[in-house]
Amino acid sequence: MINSFAYNIPFISIFLLMTAAIITPVLPKKNRLPEKLSCYVIGTVAILSAYLLYSLTSSGQNLAFNFPMGHFPAPWGNELRAGPLEAVLALVFCVSMLLSLTGNFASTAEDIAPNRRQIFCVLVNLLTASLLALTYTNDLFTAYVFIEINTIAACAIVAVKEGAETTRAALRYLIMSLVGSGLVMIAICLLYDLTGHLLMQHMHEAIKVIVATKKYLMPLTVSLALITVGLAIKSALYPFASWLPDAHGSSTNASSAILSGLVLKGHIFTIIKIFYRVFGLDVIHLLRMDTAIFILGIAAMIMGSVHALRQTNVKKMIAWSSVAQVGYIFLGVGLNTTAGIAAACLHIIVHACIKPMLFTAAGGLSNAAGHKKGLHSLMGTFYVNRWAGLGLTAGAFSMMGIPAFAGFASKLSLTLASFDHPFIIFSLAALATSSVLNALYYVPAVIVVLTHTRLPDGQDKDAHKNFTAPAPTNLYKISMFIFLALNFYLGLFCVPLLRLITRGVNVF
């Protein structure tokens, strides 16, 4: 058994972040106090999450617990559930969020007007709270409430940067997100009507009865399809991902890192919980949803990379790469096995650490090029901001699946999980093809950054020699160093982490 303090950590974490969101608007703007408070609170929640993870795993047993909120029992109760998987995801989300903020602390001051920075901090706290709530929730009502909070905050974090382009991108993001939210709400209403419950375990037992009696199978299938499509839209699963490149490409560097690396993962993990905890893998297979997710995952892996190949804007290229990486996660979910779910969760962690690093590096290189985002404009910027250049290079190698980098570990786990699937040939072919396509757009980007430009007269000269770029701050260097360390740690020591994830899935 865990101690009483650890038992309350899931609720305390969400409560602290929501409280910070309420307090932030009334804080004085002097010395950027609202932003510092957000970083301190998220750092505190990260420490609490690490303690919870230690408490759940130190005994060597597969521990998990439910935390009822209020005194309302089933069928309408609100409940949190925490196990090793939830704890490690909460820790990774908080660390990645903190590094995304600190690594882009200087650029945020340039991109966001002073009167909007407090709003930005409110949105960051709400986003982090919603991510943890979606990670811990054990009932669909709480899940839907925080899906909506996540939607509003995510769209607003795009629009916080002034400009016509960001406004258009935010509105498009909002429209697509609201469509997804509407489908999820309809599905939850159907499920409640069919099962009479909102708590996940109780819904699971009711669904088992429906399947056994073969009664109401059609409305059950419709509800599963609606909730899957709704969350797939919000997760940017291809072909529902057309909104993502503009939203992530036109927002601030910190917003891009948060949106791509973290926001998408909350919705994806919600799908995993609904598949595994509400319906069960057998029902998912019976209703053929695993096959649909498997096919869409492969399509995303290929088409996301194809679209990335066509981009000349570095942030939009990385954004389309996120679509491909989301496909990897859904491929693991579509395998519909414990090994596949564990591999998908490992890729969630890898992507949550690497993608913010890539966007932070791209922002640093863009600043070194005079705030230009075109790939050709970044030529030679490695020699102006070496930390950003290292971040882009390491992130690119990880996304390509080079050994010793984080992406290799998750791709290898997906490959091994595919061997028990009847469509193994398609899975392996998609993994190989996508990795090659990743290399086709990441390698040229790395070469451009590492290459000195050549002037028209034929003399080699650094194009940025006459441009006085701002030197990377110590905070930027520290954040990038931690990102790089996480990249290599996940690549070299992934086996204990995968064991931990598998333990968490077993008590899911």
Image (tube, rainbow, N blue to C red):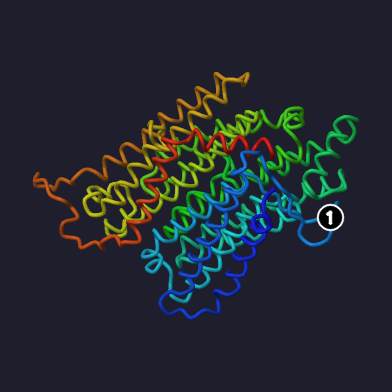
Q: Residue at x 34, y 47 (%)?
A: 391
Crowding at mark 1 (Cα within 10 Å: few <14, some 14-19, many 20+): some
Element at label 1: loop
Position of residue 489 in the picture relative to residue 504 (left or right): left
Closer-to-camera residue (483/270): 483
Q: Amino acid at mark 1?
A: Trp
Position of residue 363 in the picture relative to residue 411 (left or right): left
Closer-to-camera residue (101/482): 482
Q: Residue at x 58, y 70 (%)?
A: 20
Closer-to-camera residue (307/498): 498
Taking 82 as reference, is 154 above or below it?
below
Where is the C terminus found, in terms of image quarters?
A: top right
Taking 30 as reference, is 172 above or below it?
above
Q: What count of labels does the image hold? A: 1
Taking 63 as reference, is 29 above or below it?
below
Residue 388: give x, y in percent of width and height: 31, 51
Q: Which residue is mark 1?
A: 76
Q: Residue at x 58, y 32 (%)?
A: 331
Residue 486: give x, y in percent of width and height: 42, 45
Q: Residue at x 75, y 51 (%)?
A: 140
Taking 189 as reference, is 228 above or below it?
above
Residue 333: give x, y in percent of width and height: 62, 34
Position of residue 419 in the picture relative to residue 36 (left or right): right
Closer-to-camera residue (311/341): 341
Residue 85: give x, y in percent of width and height: 61, 43
